[in-house]
Amino acid sequence: MKTNFERMIKQAEALIETDRYYVPVLANISALIWETLDRINWAGFYIVRNGRLVLGPFQGKVACIHIEKGRGVCGTAWEKDEPVLVPDVHKFPGHIACDSASRSEIVIPIHSRGRVAAVLDIDSPEEGRFLQEDLEGLCGLTKLLEDSMEWKLASCTSDCKVLE
Ligand code: SME
């Protein structure tokens, strides 16, 4: 089924309007992705904290809590500061398997004040599940988060006493 990204982004806008704090926003956005996209088995966020990624709000099976920069698909997307679309995770060197059912994955960096503050990560049990149109639709969603979410206290690159 073709995903209606336009409708999903409108729903996301309504959710963000209520409270822009990152905890409820990312929790509800992960649930919205979970409800909207078919053939997925994990959808959620990793947040930059103390120089590595830490697990944020998500839907799906329990997942690894910390990911170092440059490791796995998430750490690679963060290091390169660009979206990474993996049609077959078995062919991605260093892929971190949180759920052995995962076959394809898409990760998109999310910025705050010009730096990567988090990544959106979605897994699918189907090989080649994510297409260019998914990347474009999801980038619309991450752009909305970048523009309208309250990131304060959500992320920091070295010392969490220094607030963004
Ligand atoms: N597969 C990811 C790790 C996170 S789980 O998919 C939820 C990676 O290689 O970075």
Image (cartoon, grey):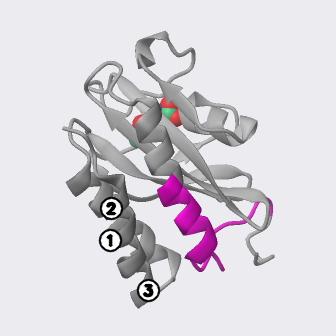
Q: Marks 3 and 1: CB-CB under 8 Å?
A: no
| Depicted 98 relative to depicted 113: above or below | above
Q: Residue at x 21, y 41 (%)?
A: 38
Report whether 1 appears left or right of 90. left
Q: Residue at x 68, y 59 (%)?
A: 111
Can you see residue 49?
yes
Q: Position of residue 63 (x, y in %)?
A: 38, 44
The tally of labels here is: 3
Quarter of the picture containing the C terminus is bottom right
| Depicted 93 relative to depicted 148: above or below | above
Q: Marks 1 and 2: CB-CB under 8 Å?
A: yes
Q: Please name the residue that numbered disc 3 is placed on.
A: 17
Can you see residue 55?
no
Q: Position of residue 104 (x, y in %)?
A: 38, 25
Q: Nearer the viewer, residue 52 or 102?
A: 102
Q: Is 88 within the magenta?
A: no
- Report how far apart the C-alphas of labels 1 and 2 lie in the structure: 5 Å
Q: Residue 6, located in which quarter of the rendered image?
A: bottom left
- Report how far apart the C-alphas of labels 3 and 1 lie in the structure: 10 Å
- What is the three-letter code of the residue carrying label 3? Glu
Q: Residues within 10 Å of mark 1 (few under 14, many from 20)?
A: few
Q: Which residues are magenta?
A: 140-158
Q: Secondary structure at mark 2?
A: helix
Q: Please name the residue that numbered disc 1 is placed on.
A: 11
- Report how far apart the C-alphas of labels 3 and 2 lie in the structure: 14 Å
